Amino acid sequence: MSSIATIEKETHGGHRTRLRERFLSGHESSRSDVAILELLLTYAIPQRDVLSLAQDLLAKFGSLEKVLAAAPADLCQIDGIKENSAVLISLVEAIRERNPAQQQATPSPPKAASAIQPGEQRVLAPLLVASTPPKPSAPAPRTAARKLQVCNGYLLEFDQLARVLDAIAQHPHQAKVERAELEEQTGLSDRQLESLVSIATAMGLIHRSKQVLTAEGALIARHDTFLDAKGTLEWCHYQGAGSPRNLVWYEIFNSILPKQQSITQDEITASLRTQLSGQYSEKTVRKHLSQEVRFVTDAYLKRNFNKLEILHQTSDQRLYRRRYANPNPLPFAAILYAHAAKQNTKLLQAEDLCRSPGSPGLLFAMDETTLRQALENLHDRELLRYERTHSLDQVRLKDDASPLSLLTAYYVAAQPQNKPPITAQGSQ
């Protein structure tokens, strides 16, 4: 019979393995401050539960960034944090602050690492990589971590998703809705909620890590809770398939399907496995990749997304795209404004809207003729300016319009309801 010490060692070892696997798979739970700090501490403190230490550090210093910036002597004031742990934490910050210019013949004063951009999740690997800007005065662009595991093994059940959105909408003024509250309100298991929140986050309906509705999510929860209106599905398709963070979803619609006349689900999985080789462990890819591919294809073939009729399947199980010719004007305009906001511009080139990864035309399988017809329709409705004179072929957006205002106009015009407004925590 194993001794208590042996049992404890095996338990901690299994937990630490799960921590690493969640991090490598892009699991949502591995992106919080406490999860990142807990994983970091496992490399300095063997055979001990370090979760409480991570919590104590965050309670004292306030955030992961402040923990990393703390002096070793201050870190050691926390009971359980010894010199090894303090050095490791401080080493992370020292590496982050390194300036490549210091290695040049003419040294220059080190510059502080640029601040983490809102909405980005910094995890271990990015923390340990020094910034390498093209010029000393300009920080290199940061790319948000990509998430392999969005569905956590579940399919997209829209009726269950509606229950989650409605439950969160009952707490409009909370800064964060706890999972326990959602379990009690929805009757769903913790694992189901984890999956549904992750999926809703991928579609831009819920704020990452807070479990509160985005402005667009609150609007949809109020007017189309079951997500069955085409305009809602257009918006959610753009958010889900157009975000590079949603790794499998994005690659299927931006890379794999556009290059193939038809392809099987197994061929999609094989293509992604080759692409991801070396980026994730073979165990992680083998366990999660086929589930993620099945989640995406099932959502468009059998769930609400099939109303868009973008993805089809032949009798011999081959998948192919079909051109989406008649988008709803207001939601499609909202998508264009959201796409421009990602690029921090008010001017879009029509050609890029068809070919660039993440662009509306590519995501909806539009050819240039179809896209231009849609743009002319929006121009006629005075939702934007489509300029095609003097060799121009560009879209100029209005200053007084936004994705949220355009979506609001769509829902109010389509289905006005006498309900009290739902307050969101801002847009994601």
Image (cartoon, rainbow, N blue to C red):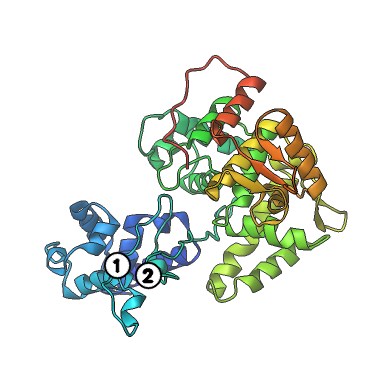
Give the number of the disc on residue 136.
2
Q: Is residue 45 visible?
A: no
Left or right of 59? Residue 366 is right
126 over 118 or under it: above or below = below
**Rendered location of residue 161, percent (x, y):** 56, 38
- Under circle 1, the secondary element is loop
Q: Position of residue 425 (x, y in %)?
A: 41, 35
Q: Amino acid at mark 2?
A: Pro
Task: Name the front one of labels 2 and 1.
Answer: 2
Q: Are marks 2 and 1 in contact (CB under 8 Å)?
A: yes
**Residue sitting nearer the eye, 168 or 204:** 204
Q: Mark 2 falls on what kind of element?
A: loop
Q: Quadrant of the N terminus?
A: bottom left
Residue farthest front in this picture = 390
Mark 2 → mark 1, Cα distance in angstroms: 8 Å
| Residue shown at the point (27%, 71%) measured from the top left | 110
User: Do we see residue 372 in this rendering?
Assistant: yes
Closest to the observer, 331 or 305: 331
